[in-house]
């Protein structure tokens, strides 16, 4: 099962690359990065609604459940909007390889810190020499990609 999740993560990386180009072309076609972002989220929302209707087997939680959720647990959509809008703004200027290299660098740096401290509900995975070495090697690869 672990390898299925690794493969899904790999496919997500491919999807992010394609998504960057598609959204960038949408921005050019409609001359608005914000409207392109809105369209991206609306089509994603529609797809998720269909998935929910088709695959969900549990009842919708009662309204009180939503009221009791901590404020910071609601910002995932804001972070997603920041991601999509920033990608739309930057990918045409710096190219997908540079964009994705910097995304990966940021994700890994944040990931190793979040893992180390167990923030936002994750289990603690302490920083060690192997993780630091791995991050260093990947950062070196990012630097090489950016050197073009």
Image (spheres, helix red, strand yellow):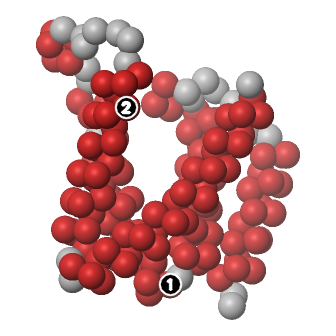
Residue 130 in sight here: yes
- In this picture, is 46 found above or below 17? above
Q: Position of residue 87 (x, y in %)?
A: 41, 69
Distance from label 2 to label 1 (Cα)? 34 Å
The image quadrant that residue 38 belongs to is bottom left
Can residue 106 be seen in the rendering of this structure? no
Horizontal arrangement in the rendering, residue 141 relative to residue 85 (left or right): right
Q: Which residue is mark 2?
A: 51
Element marked by disc 2: helix
* Image position of 4 with respect to 67: above or below: below
Quadrant occupied by the N terminus? top right
For the residue labelled by badge 1, is the local secondary structure a helix, a strand or a loop? Answer: helix
Task: Locate residue 78, reporting x and y percent.
Answer: 28, 48
Q: Residue furthest front?
A: 54
**Is 108 left or right of 79, judged from the image as shown?**
right
On the image, the x and y values in percent for residue 2 come to 75, 29
* Residue shown at the point (46%, 73%) measured from the top left: 21
> Dot 1 corresponds to which residue?
94
- x and y, in percent, of residue 80 in the image: 35, 51
Task: Check the picture and name the quadrant holding the C terminus.
Answer: bottom right
């Amino acid at each position: 099962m672990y390898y299925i999740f690794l493969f899904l993560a790999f496919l997500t990386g491919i999807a992010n690359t394609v998504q960057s180009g598609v959204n960038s072309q949408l921005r050019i076609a409609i001359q608005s990065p914000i409207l392109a972002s809105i369209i991206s989220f609306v089509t994603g929302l529609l797809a998720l609604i269909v998935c929910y209707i088709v695959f969900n087997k549990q009842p919708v939680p009662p309204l009180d459940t939503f009221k009791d959720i901590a404020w910071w647990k609601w910002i995932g959509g804001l972070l997603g909007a920041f991601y999509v809008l920033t990608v739309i703004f930057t990918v045409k200027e710096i190219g997908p390889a540079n964009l994705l290299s910097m995304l990966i660098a940021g994700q890994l740096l944040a990931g190793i810190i979040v893992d180390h401290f167990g923030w936002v509900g994750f289990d603690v995975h302490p920083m060690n020499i192997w993780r630091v070495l791995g991050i260093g090697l990947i950062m070196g690869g990012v630097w090489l990609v950016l050197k073009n």
